[in-house]
C-alpha cells in the first residue's frame, strides 16, 4: 500500500498537471458516478490527507480517491500514449487542454461536496506531512491504548495519518524495539513520532524511499524486505512474519532479533499476527 510520502508526490503531480485549468474531458468509470458531468469545471487543487487524495473542483465539488494496495494516478501530455495498465483498469480520466490524469485500479473513487470532505477524512489522526502536524495529539492518541502493539498502532490512521507497512518496520528498527512491543512500554514515544515525521518529510520528494542514508541499491532500507538476509547493522538474519488482518492481503513485518531485543515485561508466544482494525 502506498505510504504518505508516495501519496504526497501523487498529489503534487496531479496539482501541477491540472490545477488552474478547466476540464475538457472527465470520465469516472464507477457506477455511482459514471453520469457525473464535470466538463468545464476548473480544477482548483489536489491535496493529500494522509493516504487520501482530494481533488477540488470549481462549483464546490471534490473528487476523493484512495490508492489502497496498487492504485495509481498517472499524468500525460496531450497526445501522449497512456501507460499504467490495461484500459479495463482505468477508473478515472481528468483531462485539460494540455494534460490528462488517468487513475488506474482505484478502489476508492467518489464525488462529494467539498463542504463534506470531513465525512471521508475527518476520522484521520494528525497528518505527518500536513502543515498542521500535531505531534502532541498523535502521542495522545497512541497512548490511549497502552496495551496495543506499537506496530499495529502506527498503521492505524486514526492515530496518525501517513504511515504504512514499510515505515512500520523501519521505525521500530531505528528505535530498537520489536514491533509487537506494547505502546505503554515504548521508550520515549515522542522520539519515535519525531523520527516518523522526519523520515516522511525527507522522502516525500524522492523517487526511491531511503531510511538508512545509503542510496546504493539494496541498502536503502534497514530491514523491510530483507527477510532471511543479513541485518545491515549487525549481520544477524532479518526475520519476518505476517502481521496483516486475515481479511486483507498479508502485510509482513520485518525485524532484527539482535538489534530489536524484547523489552522487559513483554512476551511473544509466536510470530505476530495482529488483526486489529486500522482506519485508512
Image (cartoon, grey):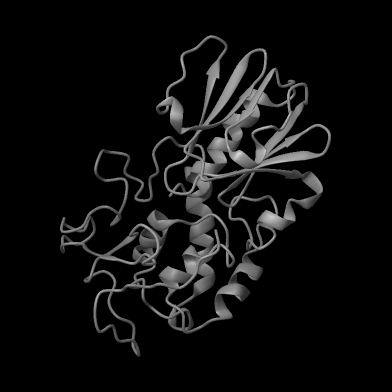
Taking the spot 66% from the left edge, 38% from the top edge, the residue there is 33
How many marks the image carries: the answer is 0
- In the rendered image, is residue 47 in sight? no
- Compared with 8, 167 (above or below) is below
- In the rendered image, is residue 200 in sight? yes
In screen coordinates, is 61 left or right of 51?
Answer: right
The quarter holding residue 275 reads: bottom left
- Name the quadrant of the C terminus: bottom right
- Compared with 81, 177 (above or below) is below
Which of 72/139 is in front?
72
Where residue 136 appears, x then y in whole percent? 65, 69
- Compared with 256, 183 (above or below) is below
View extreme (bottom): residue: 265
The quarter holding residue 38 reads: top right
In screen coordinates, is 10 left or right of 210?
Answer: right
Which of 238/22 is in front?
22
Taking the spot 30% from the left edge, 74% from the top edge, the residue there is 272
Where residue 123 appears, x then y in whole percent? 66, 63
Which of 76/159 is in front?
76
- Compared with 136, 34 (above or below) is above
View extreme (top): residue: 79
In screen coordinates, is 204 left or right of 122?
Answer: left
Where residue 186 appears, x then y in whole percent? 44, 78
Taking the spot 65% from the left edge, 57% from the top edge, the residue there is 133
Amino acid at each position: 500500500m502506498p505510504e504518505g510520502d508516495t501519496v504526497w508526490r501523487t498529489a503534487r503531480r496531479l496539482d501541477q498537471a491540472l490545477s488552474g485549468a478547466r476540464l475538457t474531458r472527465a470520465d469516472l468509470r464507477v457506477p455511482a458516478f459514471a453520469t457525473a458531468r464535470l466538463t468545464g469545471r476548473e480544477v482548483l487543487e489536489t491535496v493529500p490527507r494522509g493516504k487520501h487524495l482530494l481533488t477540488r473542483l470549481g462549483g464546490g465539488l471534490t473528487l476523493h480517491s484512495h490508492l489502497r494496495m496498487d492504485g495509481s494516478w498517472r499524468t500525460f501530455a496531450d497526445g501522449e500514449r497512456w501507460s499504467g495498465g490495461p484500459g479495463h483498469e482505468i477508473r478515472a480520466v481528468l483531462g485539460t487542454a494540455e494534460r490528462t490524469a488517468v487513475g488506474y485500479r482505484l478502489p476508492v473513487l467518489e464525488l462529494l461536496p467539498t463542504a463534506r470532505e470531513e465525512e471521508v477524512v475527518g476520522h484521520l489522526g494528525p497528518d505527518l506531512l500536513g502543515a498542521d502536524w500535531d505531534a502532541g495529539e498523535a502521542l495522545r492518541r497512541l497512548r490511549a491504548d497502552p496495551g496495543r502493539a506499537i506496530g499495529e498502532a502506527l498503521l492505524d490512521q486514526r492515530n496518525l495519518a501517513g504511515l504504512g507497512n514499510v515505515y512500520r518496520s523501519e521505525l521500530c528498527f531505528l528505535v530498537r524495539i520489536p514491533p509487537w512491543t506494547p505502546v505503554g512500554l515504548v521508550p520515549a514515544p515522542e522520539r519515535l513520532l519525531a523520527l516518523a515525521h522526519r523520515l516522511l518529510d525527507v522522502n516525500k520528494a524522492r523517487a526511491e524511499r531511503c531510511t538508512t542514508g545509503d542510496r546504493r541499491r539494496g541498502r536503502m532500507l534497514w530491514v523491510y524486505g530483507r527477510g532471511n538476509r543479513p541485518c545491515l547493522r549487525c549481520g544477524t538474519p532479518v526475520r519476518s512474519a505476517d502481521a496483516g488482518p486475515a481479511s486483507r492481503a498479508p502485510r509482513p513485518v520485518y525485524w532484527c532479533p539482535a538489534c530489536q531485543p524484547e523489552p522487559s515485561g513483554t512476551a511473544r508466544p509466536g510470530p505476530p499476527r495482529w488483526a486489529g482494525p486500522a482506519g485508512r
